[in-house]
């Protein structure tokens, strides 16, 4: 692009922003924040053009600005250039037969692993919650949408994908080659602990899991269990509907969650007494690897004072809905259009779900590959020595003692 053409592009950009700003100013004289922002943007463009150390590539500058604009909103929103959107549409038309089995979001601007599924290629390759994927298949992820990353991490069973992983405690990125595989049907992990206390670990809330949970709760009660520990740590995959359906198994009344956004009709999801199967005490284990539908479930139980949420830290915060908006030039926005709110009206996406019973993590100055602080590895039930589990048991035993005393 010649210098003359660049100057024309810059001038037109300034004129467009000035025109929009003037229209805004005339239409909404009581609020000039947007006008000031647009004016600053045009000034920045002019300084980049005239004062930068070398002649800038305005197309790259604009693309970077648009990516940054969407990245500044939340982890799930993103901008797709015309080429990126064309590729995205093509690859989302058919679901890949194989995947690695990991829940993703963004952290520090890069794609991050929220959790990995039991018996998944991701787990077997050594991927773990909290890992930052610096690159996937050779593509750096700092301007990558979560949906784009999910596409890259799916393919024909037997094929592999290379990822570069940044992990706490390591000075250099870890290089991994992870195979794609057809994942087994989701299943519950359960164990019986300490007399009449049942323990149920839910690795994901994919379609059909609420039915499995219902059957297991009925079985527990028949077997004489009077208290339940529901382990939702590292549970981050599945549709919101599954979290809501599972919450209805525990709540006789009250609000489960509310979905709200500027352009979205408010939806309130309520308890249904006819669907309750567990009326006995329950404690819910949560972690930073708890996300999405599991957050709706945990927030509903805690928000309706049905049981405690027990953990060392708040949940990840991804309970929201996105919409793909195509633009005239062939690009697109993946935009968060609504957030789920807790029964006490807090945004889960913004604040996560905070433990009602916090367990203080022991000081660990060094974390090695052999050490697994916090939740047990995916695919295994918790040990009785797990401090979060011990706290939940104490709470359940305490509530039982209080009822007897009363």
Image: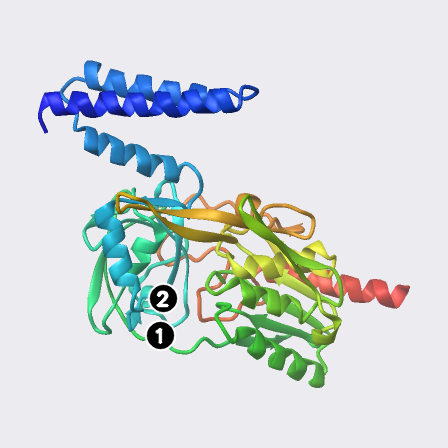
Q: Is residue 133 left or right of residue 272?
A: left
Q: Is residue 175 visible?
A: no
What is the image's colouring? Answer: rainbow
Circle 1 packing at 10 Å, graded few (<14), some (14-19), many (20+), is: some
Image point (56%, 79%), residue name? 212
The number of numbered discs placed on residues in the rendered structure image is 2
The span from disc 1 to disc 2 (Cα, nearest Å) is 7 Å
Residue at point 25% right, 24% down?
12
Where's residue 284, x and y in %?
Answer: 63, 62
On screen, residue 98 versus residue 31, left or right, reads left
Q: Secondary structure at mark 1?
A: loop
In depth, the one of 336 and 404 nearer the eye is: 336
Q: Which residue is mark 2?
A: 101
In front of the other: 259 or 286:
259
- Mark 1 near mark 2, Cβ–Cβ under 8 Å? yes
Q: Position of residue 245 (x, y in %)?
A: 61, 69
Closer to the camera in the image, 322 or 361: 322
| Above/below status of 202 relative to 85 | below
Residue found at x 91% / y 64%: 406
Q: Quadrant of residue 97?
A: bottom left
Please give left or right for residue 223 compared with residue 114 in the image: right
Locate residue 258 relative to residue 253 in the image: left or right. Answer: left
Q: Residue furthest left?
A: 2
| Most distant residue in the top direction | 51
Disc 1 target residue = 183
What residue is at 53 percent from the left and 55 percent from the top?
287
Residue 118 vertical placement versus 170 (above, below) = below
């Amino acid at each position: 692009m010649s210098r003359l053409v660049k100057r024309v592009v810059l001038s037109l950009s300034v004129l467009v922003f000035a025109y929009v700003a003037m229209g805004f100013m005339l239409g909404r004289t009581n609020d000039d924040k947007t006008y000031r922002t647009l004016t600053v943007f045009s000034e920045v463009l002019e300084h980049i053009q005239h004062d930068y150390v070398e002649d800038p590539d305005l197309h790259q500058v604009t693309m970077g600005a648009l990516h940054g604009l969407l990245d500044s909103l939340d982890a799930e929103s993103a901008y797709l250039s015309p080429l990126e959107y064309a590729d995205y549409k093509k690859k989302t038309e058919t679901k890949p037969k194989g995947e690695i089995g990991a829940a993703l979001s963004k952290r520090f601007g890069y794609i991050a692993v929220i959790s990995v599924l039991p018996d998944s290629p991701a787990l077997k390759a050594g991927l773990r919650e909290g890992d930052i994927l610096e690159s996937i298949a050779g593509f750096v992820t700092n301007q990558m949408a979560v949906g784009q990353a999910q596409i890259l991490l799916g393919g024909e069973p037997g094929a592999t994908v290379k990822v570069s992983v940044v992990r706490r405690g390591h000075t250099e990125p870890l290089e991994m080659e992870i195979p794609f595989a057809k994942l087994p049907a989701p299943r519950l992990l359960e164990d019986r602990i300490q007399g009449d206390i049942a323990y149920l670990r839910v690795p994901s809330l994919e379609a059909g899991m609420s039915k499995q949970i219902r059957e297991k709760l009925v079985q527990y009660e028949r077997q004489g269990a009077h208290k339940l520990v529901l382990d939702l740590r590292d549970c981050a995959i599945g549709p919101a509907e599954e979290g809501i359906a599972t919450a209805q198994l525990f709540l006789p009344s009250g609000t489960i969650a509310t979905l709200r956004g500027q352009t979205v009709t408010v939806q309130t999801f309520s308890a249904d007494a006819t669907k309750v199967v567990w009326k006995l005490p329950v404690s819910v284990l949560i972690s930073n690897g708890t996300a999405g539908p599991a957050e709706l479930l945990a927030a509903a139980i805690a928000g309706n004072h049905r049981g405690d949420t027990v953990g060392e830290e708040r949940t990840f915060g991804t309970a929201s809905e996105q919409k793909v908006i195509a633009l005239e030039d062939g690009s697109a926005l993946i935009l968060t259009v609504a957030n789920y709110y807790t029964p006490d009206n807090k945004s889960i996406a913004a604040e996560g779900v905070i433990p009602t019973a916090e367990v203080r993590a022991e000081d660990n100055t060094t974390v090695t590959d052999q050490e697994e602080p916090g939740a047990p590895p995916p695919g295994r039930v918790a040990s009785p020595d797990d401090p979060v589990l011990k706290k939940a048991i104490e709470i359940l035993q305490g509530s039982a003692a209080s009822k007897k005393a009363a």
